Amino acid sequence: MPPINRSDQINEQAYLKDELAAETKHEFVDGQVQAMVSASKNHGRISGNIRRQFSAHLKTSSCEPFGSDIKIRTPTGNYRYPDCMVVCDDQAENDEYYTESPTILVEVISRSTRKIDEQIKRLEYINIPTLKEYVLIEQDFVDVTVYRQSDNWRPTHYFLGDDVLFESIELALSVEEIYHRVKNQDMQEFLETNKPNPE
Protein backbone atom coordinates (compact mmCIF):
# COMPACT_ATOMS: atom_id res chain seq x y z
CA MET A 1 0.00 0.00 0.00
CA PRO A 2 1.16 3.57 -0.64
CA PRO A 3 1.61 5.94 2.33
CA ILE A 4 -1.59 6.97 4.10
CA ASN A 5 -2.43 10.64 3.56
CA ARG A 6 -3.68 13.00 6.24
CA SER A 7 -5.60 15.84 4.66
CA ASP A 8 -4.70 18.49 7.24
CA GLN A 9 -1.96 20.92 6.19
CA ILE A 10 0.77 21.78 8.70
CA ASN A 11 3.97 23.75 8.39
CA GLU A 12 7.49 22.34 8.33
CA GLN A 13 8.43 23.24 11.89
CA ALA A 14 5.24 21.72 13.29
CA TYR A 15 5.93 18.51 11.36
CA LEU A 16 9.51 18.26 12.68
CA LYS A 17 8.34 18.84 16.25
CA ASP A 18 5.46 16.34 16.02
CA GLU A 19 7.68 13.71 14.36
CA LEU A 20 10.03 13.63 17.36
CA ALA A 21 7.17 12.38 19.55
CA ALA A 22 5.36 10.25 16.96
CA GLU A 23 5.07 6.48 17.50
CA THR A 24 5.14 5.82 13.75
CA LYS A 25 7.19 7.51 11.03
CA HIS A 26 5.63 10.09 8.72
CA GLU A 27 6.89 11.79 5.60
CA PHE A 28 6.14 15.46 4.93
CA VAL A 29 5.11 15.98 1.30
CA ASP A 30 3.69 19.20 -0.14
CA GLY A 31 2.55 20.38 3.26
CA GLN A 32 0.80 17.11 4.15
CA VAL A 33 1.81 14.42 6.61
CA GLN A 34 1.91 10.88 5.22
CA ALA A 35 2.15 7.90 7.58
CA MET A 36 4.57 5.19 6.50
CA VAL A 37 3.22 1.65 6.15
CA SER A 38 4.79 -1.53 7.50
CA ALA A 39 7.55 -3.22 5.52
CA SER A 40 7.74 -6.90 4.54
CA LYS A 41 10.45 -9.32 5.66
CA ASN A 42 12.00 -9.28 2.17
CA HIS A 43 12.04 -5.49 2.31
CA GLY A 44 13.85 -5.65 5.64
CA ARG A 45 16.31 -8.27 4.38
CA ILE A 46 17.30 -6.20 1.34
CA SER A 47 17.66 -2.90 3.18
CA GLY A 48 19.59 -4.67 5.96
CA ASN A 49 21.93 -6.32 3.46
CA ILE A 50 22.70 -3.03 1.75
CA ARG A 51 23.30 -1.15 4.97
CA ARG A 52 25.59 -3.86 6.40
CA GLN A 53 27.67 -3.89 3.22
CA PHE A 54 27.88 -0.10 3.17
CA SER A 55 28.85 -0.03 6.87
CA ALA A 56 31.63 -2.58 6.45
CA HIS A 57 33.04 -0.83 3.39
CA LEU A 58 32.87 2.66 4.90
CA LYS A 59 34.20 1.72 8.34
CA THR A 60 37.25 3.99 8.04
CA SER A 61 35.72 6.51 5.62
CA SER A 62 34.33 9.97 6.22
CA CYS A 63 31.19 8.76 4.42
CA GLU A 64 28.50 7.31 6.68
CA PRO A 65 25.56 4.98 5.99
CA PHE A 66 22.14 5.41 7.58
CA GLY A 67 19.02 3.27 7.66
CA SER A 68 15.37 4.21 7.33
CA ASP A 69 15.15 6.14 10.62
CA ILE A 70 16.93 9.21 9.25
CA LYS A 71 15.07 11.67 7.02
CA ILE A 72 16.27 13.64 4.03
CA ARG A 73 15.08 17.15 3.26
CA THR A 74 14.74 17.56 -0.50
CA PRO A 75 15.01 20.83 -2.46
CA THR A 76 11.19 20.94 -2.62
CA GLY A 77 11.04 21.22 1.17
CA ASN A 78 9.66 17.69 1.51
CA TYR A 79 10.97 15.22 4.09
CA ARG A 80 11.43 11.59 3.04
CA TYR A 81 12.60 8.41 4.76
CA PRO A 82 14.74 6.46 2.24
CA ASP A 83 15.40 2.81 3.06
CA CYS A 84 19.14 3.42 3.13
CA MET A 85 21.52 6.22 2.27
CA VAL A 86 25.15 7.26 2.37
CA VAL A 87 26.14 10.76 3.46
CA CYS A 88 29.68 11.98 2.76
CA ASP A 89 29.43 15.69 3.56
CA ASP A 90 26.56 16.38 5.93
CA GLN A 91 25.42 19.94 5.35
CA ALA A 92 22.83 19.62 8.15
CA GLU A 93 25.29 18.25 10.69
CA ASN A 94 23.76 20.32 13.48
CA ASP A 95 20.47 18.43 13.11
CA GLU A 96 20.44 14.85 14.36
CA TYR A 97 17.25 13.80 12.58
CA TYR A 98 17.67 14.68 8.92
CA THR A 99 20.21 15.49 6.23
CA GLU A 100 20.07 17.57 3.07
CA SER A 101 23.19 16.15 1.38
CA PRO A 102 23.00 12.41 0.61
CA THR A 103 25.50 10.86 -1.80
CA ILE A 104 23.56 7.61 -2.37
CA LEU A 105 19.85 6.99 -1.84
CA VAL A 106 18.34 3.49 -1.85
CA GLU A 107 14.67 2.57 -2.02
CA VAL A 108 13.34 -1.02 -1.84
CA ILE A 109 10.20 -1.15 -3.96
CA SER A 110 7.12 -3.28 -4.61
CA ARG A 111 4.19 -3.08 -7.02
CA SER A 112 2.35 -0.67 -4.76
CA THR A 113 5.27 1.77 -4.34
CA ARG A 114 6.90 1.51 -7.78
CA LYS A 115 5.23 4.58 -9.31
CA ILE A 116 6.14 6.80 -6.37
CA ASP A 117 9.75 5.57 -6.22
CA GLU A 118 10.40 5.45 -9.98
CA GLN A 119 8.71 8.69 -10.90
CA ILE A 120 7.84 11.06 -8.06
CA LYS A 121 10.77 10.41 -5.73
CA ARG A 122 13.27 10.01 -8.56
CA LEU A 123 12.49 13.46 -9.95
CA GLU A 124 12.65 14.89 -6.46
CA TYR A 125 15.88 13.12 -5.51
CA ILE A 126 17.95 13.79 -8.63
CA ASN A 127 17.60 17.51 -7.98
CA ILE A 128 19.56 17.13 -4.73
CA PRO A 129 22.93 18.73 -5.63
CA THR A 130 25.07 16.22 -3.69
CA LEU A 131 23.35 13.06 -4.94
CA LYS A 132 25.51 10.81 -7.12
CA GLU A 133 23.45 7.59 -7.27
CA TYR A 134 19.81 6.63 -6.80
CA VAL A 135 19.20 2.90 -6.38
CA LEU A 136 15.89 1.05 -6.73
CA ILE A 137 15.72 -2.59 -5.61
CA GLU A 138 12.71 -4.75 -6.37
CA GLN A 139 11.65 -7.04 -3.52
CA ASP A 140 9.19 -9.31 -5.37
CA PHE A 141 11.68 -10.29 -8.09
CA VAL A 142 15.39 -9.67 -8.77
CA ASP A 143 16.16 -6.34 -10.43
CA VAL A 144 18.49 -3.61 -9.19
CA THR A 145 18.28 -0.29 -11.02
CA VAL A 146 20.93 2.39 -10.57
CA TYR A 147 20.53 5.97 -11.77
CA ARG A 148 23.87 7.80 -11.81
CA GLN A 149 24.57 11.50 -12.07
CA SER A 150 27.67 10.59 -14.10
CA ASP A 151 25.41 8.92 -16.70
CA ASN A 152 22.86 11.77 -16.87
CA TRP A 153 20.51 9.84 -14.57
CA ARG A 154 19.89 7.09 -17.11
CA PRO A 155 18.86 3.74 -15.57
CA THR A 156 21.17 0.71 -15.56
CA HIS A 157 19.66 -2.65 -14.58
CA TYR A 158 21.47 -5.48 -12.80
CA PHE A 159 20.36 -9.09 -12.40
CA LEU A 160 21.60 -12.31 -10.82
CA GLY A 161 25.19 -12.96 -11.87
CA ASP A 162 25.95 -9.21 -12.15
CA ASP A 163 28.00 -6.96 -9.88
CA VAL A 164 26.55 -3.57 -8.98
CA LEU A 165 29.11 -0.77 -8.85
CA PHE A 166 28.46 2.06 -6.43
CA GLU A 167 30.81 4.50 -8.12
CA SER A 168 30.62 7.26 -5.54
CA ILE A 169 32.05 5.06 -2.76
CA GLU A 170 34.05 2.64 -4.94
CA LEU A 171 32.14 -0.46 -3.85
CA ALA A 172 31.09 -3.43 -5.99
CA LEU A 173 28.41 -5.79 -4.66
CA SER A 174 27.05 -8.88 -6.36
CA VAL A 175 23.31 -8.98 -6.88
CA GLU A 176 23.34 -12.23 -4.87
CA GLU A 177 24.78 -10.34 -1.86
CA ILE A 178 22.06 -7.72 -2.10
CA TYR A 179 19.36 -10.44 -2.18
CA HIS A 180 20.90 -12.66 0.51
CA ARG A 181 18.12 -14.61 2.34
CA VAL A 182 15.41 -12.95 0.21
CA LYS A 183 12.55 -15.29 -0.63
CA ASN A 184 11.06 -14.67 -4.04
CA GLN A 185 10.70 -16.86 -7.12
CA ASP A 186 13.83 -15.54 -8.84
CA MET A 187 16.00 -16.29 -5.82
CA GLN A 188 14.43 -19.70 -5.24
CA GLU A 189 15.13 -20.71 -8.84
CA PHE A 190 18.68 -19.33 -8.65
CA LEU A 191 19.47 -21.20 -5.43
CA GLU A 192 17.99 -24.42 -6.79
CA THR A 193 20.00 -24.13 -10.00
CA ASN A 194 23.22 -23.37 -8.14
CA LYS A 195 22.75 -25.90 -5.35
CA PRO A 196 25.99 -27.89 -4.75
CA ASN A 197 25.92 -31.43 -6.04
CA PRO A 198 26.10 -34.05 -3.26
CA GLU A 199 29.31 -36.03 -3.32
Image (cartoon, rainbow, N blue to C red):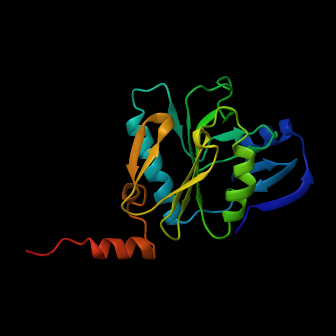
| Drawn side of residue 6 relative to residue 172, left or right | right
| Drawn side of residue 21 relative to residue 33, left or right | left
| Drawn side of residue 113 relative to residue 28, left or right | left
Figure quadrant of the C terminus? bottom left
| Drawn side of residue 22 relative to residue 49, left or right | right
Q: Residue at x 81, y 49 (%)?
A: 29
Query: Does residue 162 sit above or below 80 in this rendering?
Result: below
Q: Residue at x 82, y 60 (%)?
A: 5
Q: Residue at x 42, y 60 (%)?
A: 179
Q: Residue at x 65, y 32 (%)?
A: 130
Image coordinates for residue 74, horizontal then vertical, percent: 75, 39
Q: Nearer the viewer, residue 40 or 171?
A: 171
Query: Does residue 9 sit above or below 91 in this rendering?
Result: below
Q: Nearer the viewer, residue 67 or 188?
A: 188
Q: Nearer the viewer, residue 25 or 43?
A: 43
Figure quadrant of the N terminus? bottom right
Seen from this angle, which residue lies furthest left? Answer: 199
Query: Quarter of the image holding residue 114?
Result: bottom right
Query: Quarter of the image holding residue 18?
Result: top right
- Count of numbered badges drawn on the protein: 0
Image coordinates for residue 46, horizontal then vertical, percent: 48, 57
Image coordinates for residue 198, horizontal then vertical, percent: 12, 75
